[in-house]
Image (cartoon, rainbow, N blue to C red):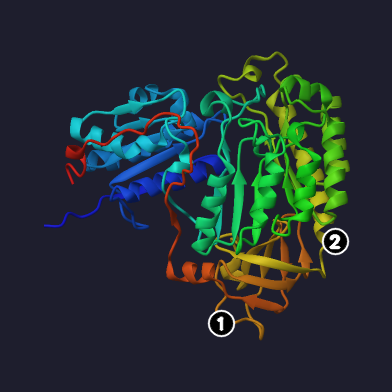
Amino acid sequence: MTSVPRTYEIRTFGCQMNVHDSERLAGQLEEAGYRPAGRDAQPDLVVFNTCAVRENADNKLYGTLGHLRPAKDANPGMQIAVGGCLAQKDRGDIVKRAPWVDVVFGTHNLGSLPALLERARHNAEAEVEILESLETFPSTLPARRDSAYSGWVSISVGCNNTCTFCIVPSLRGKERDRRPGEILAEIEALVAEGVLEVTLLGQNVNSYGVEFGDRLAFGKLLRACGAVDGLERVRFTSPHPAAFTDDVIEAMAETPSVCPQLHMPLQSGSDRILKLMRRSYRASRYLSIVDKVRAALPAAAITTDIIVGFPGETEEDFEATLDVVRQARFASAFTFQYSKRPGTPAATMDGQVPKEVVGERYERLVALQNEISWQENKKLVGRKVELLVAAGEGRKDSETHRMSGRARDGRLVHFTPSGPAVQGTVRPGDIVETVITYAAPHHLVADGEPLSHRRTTAGDNTEAGRRPTTSGVSLGLPAFGAPPVVPAANVGCGG
């Protein structure tokens, strides 16, 4: 008698790293025989891939776990697993606070999840496994990709910086770099599946090469990506201003597939605050990079991250941030009100700024950036853009009868998917050329008929519901320990 496959659902909190880690978790689970749960079905397994960056991250997790407890009580065979950064930080406390959790695993042992689930079921007790260093490089694990047209590719994990507001280094460890051949092999595997765009991921993506002693490695990698046949767009996130070198700007300008887009965190425009943050650059250095990028790539869209209300921030410090924003003229900015991250030096610093002051400054920053974004977007009205059609990017697309896509510079464009140039149905993953007719602060609109429409393999795969599943890629990266061996007798127990 054939057993019914167990079903799973992964709920992801946090950054792009976590999203990509969840793709790896999904790949392992499907390799172990699990299948995605239907939209309205109760899964046999729920995995939480957590973030520990925000102050209320633990409240969000434990609240969600509490909501899930009745389903667990009603179905004792159901399993709940918690992984990611909060699991790395809280460890066994998770099971103490939520004893209905079956498995807790950390950032360094993603590959252990299937074995830990089987062990928890076999032993009928919670399994907690948190390692202090990488057990195996995440890229050696299989991945079930979320998108048929765009893929994440991790080039490094961990971080060597000591920013006082950030807990990532203590949870993800020191930077570890993949070999270029491994990265390119993964990209080629994605392109062979129809993927048109990749985003290179690293905590400080442009410090790539530090582990094997090549400070120019990131620029070389960008050029090598440009030689991959069929790869149309290359993006990367997030570079650190202190590690930004001129050869990277040259590689961006000289490699056609590298998109004219740069997301580079500023955090603060005050040199005094940058020093307190242990950000190893100053405002003038940041602005000089912006100027060089714009000189080499005049159409580049530059975006950033900014923290408002860091401990000790005065009105003068905040005005310095506003001045840098005015000079840099960012296409957009992710702005954050400072909140304490337990375990970080900033959490215990003197001069914590009152919440009402932080809130008032935040509103002023958002108003300024929105006005700049709108002004910059209005310059694009009448311009032709090439869009990679996206799924789920336009919240009002069904009401407006539009679709949405990303321009090469990363801007979101809502467009009309009809006209004589359209070849049948436009699908996510297809390429459309159109002309911008209207600008808003956070998006653009192209209401005229598209100039062209190119159907792609990625569009075919989207239409058919197919997503790339890539096997782990390993071409000789130094090992960080052997992966766990699942005892044969335990595989498939209790199905």
Q: Front-most of 410 and 135?
A: 135
Q: Could you say which quadrant of the image residue 159 lies in? A: top right
Q: Secondary structure beneath disc 2?
A: loop
280 shown above or below 336 = above
Left or right: 290 in relation to 19: right
Q: Front-most of 262 and 221?
A: 221
59 shown above or below 373 = above
Residue under the point 66% across and 46% down:
221
Q: Could you say which quadrant of the image residue 349 lies in? A: top right
Please name the residue that numbered disc 1 is placed on: 424
Please name the residue that numbered disc 2 is placed on: 379
Q: Which residue lies most toward the front here?
A: 476
Residue under the point 11% across and 57% down:
1
For the residue carrying disc 2, how many other residues have a C-alpha within 10 Å: few (<14), some (14-19), or many (20+)? Answer: few
Residue under the point 34% across and 58% down:
38
Spatial distance from mark 1 to mark 2, Cα to Cα? 32 Å
Left or right: 185 in relation to 31: right
Residue 313 is situated, as x and y percent measured from the top left of the image, at 78, 23
Residue 468 is situated, as x and y percent measured from the top left of the image, at 45, 59
Q: How many numbered marks have been drawn onto this rendered protein structure?
A: 2
Q: Which residue lies most toward the bottom here?
A: 420
Mark carried by residue 305 = none
Q: Front-most of 328 and 377?
A: 328
Mark 1 and mark 2 in contact? Answer it, CB < 8 Å. no
